[in-house]
Image (cartoon, grey):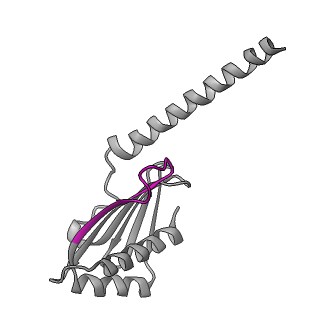
């Protein structure tokens, strides 16, 4: 009976382990080795903000770019999906106002580096103002851009 269970469970465990390792390799390739194509052909001066989310429990690998004219593109590289849409006027006006006041900045963070389900965030805000952003303003921008992403994710 024990030998029979060993013959059944051992291949199953090995298969699961191989699938896990292959999955990690795929995620690393998709998010770190293979470069992302630009979401559309606009220049960086047209960009208002962009964010790239990788990981997390739900498996984000999304790249959102919001342009000054209100158009936006989400590229989900893992699922090979792209969605083009218009940002709601309230959110766009808030981002434009902040971009007129604040200078350009970038942010990179991970919610919990010790957690395998941690979410990595890379954000670039293309501000044209002269004021250095305070942490509260950065948090506002991150929350606003995250909500745009979640509401429009393909």
In the rendered image, the vertical position of residue 32 relative to residue 131, given as above or below = above
Left or right of 149? Residue 97 is: left
What stretch of residues is rendered in magenta? 105-120
Residue 103 appears at what percent x and percent y? 19, 78
For residue 111: magenta? yes
Vertical placement of residue 100 versus 39, above or below:
below
Kindly identify the residue that appears in the image at 68 percent across and 25 percent down.
12
Q: Residue at x 51, y 64 (%)?
A: 153
Q: Residue furthest right?
A: 1
Is 98 left, or right, of 45 in this rendering? right
Instruction: Tell me where residue 61 appears, x and y as whole percent.
Output: 45, 53
Residue at image location 45% in from the left, 70% down from the top? 146
> Looking at the image, which is closer to me, 70 or 127?
127
56 inside magenta stretch: no
Q: At 43% from the left edge and 60% from the top edge, which residue is drawn?
A: 111
Which corner quadrant holds the N terminus? top right
User: What percent of the width, then of the height, locates residue 52?
Assistant: 37, 59
134 vs 38, nearest the viewer: 134
């Amino acid at each position: 009976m024990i030998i029979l269970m060993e013959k059944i469970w051992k291949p199953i465990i090995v298969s699961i382990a191989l699938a896990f390792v292959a999955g990690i390799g795929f995620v690393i390739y998709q998010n770190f080795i293979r470069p992302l194509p630009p979401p559309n052909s606009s220049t960086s001066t047209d960009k208002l903000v962009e964010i790239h989310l990788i990981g997390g429990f739900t498996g984000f690998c999304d790249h959102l770019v919001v342009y000054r004219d209100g158009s936006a593109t989400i590229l989900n590289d893992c699922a090979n999906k792209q969605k083009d849409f218009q940002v709601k006027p309230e959110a766009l006006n808030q981002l434009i106002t902040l971009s007129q006041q604040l200078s350009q900045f970038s942010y990179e963070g991970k919610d919990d580096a010790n957690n395998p389900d941690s979410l990595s965030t890379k954000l670039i805000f293309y501000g044209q103002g002269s004021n250095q952003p305070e942490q509260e303003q950065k948090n506002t921008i991150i929350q606003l851009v995250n909500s745009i992403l979640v509401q429009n994710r393909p």
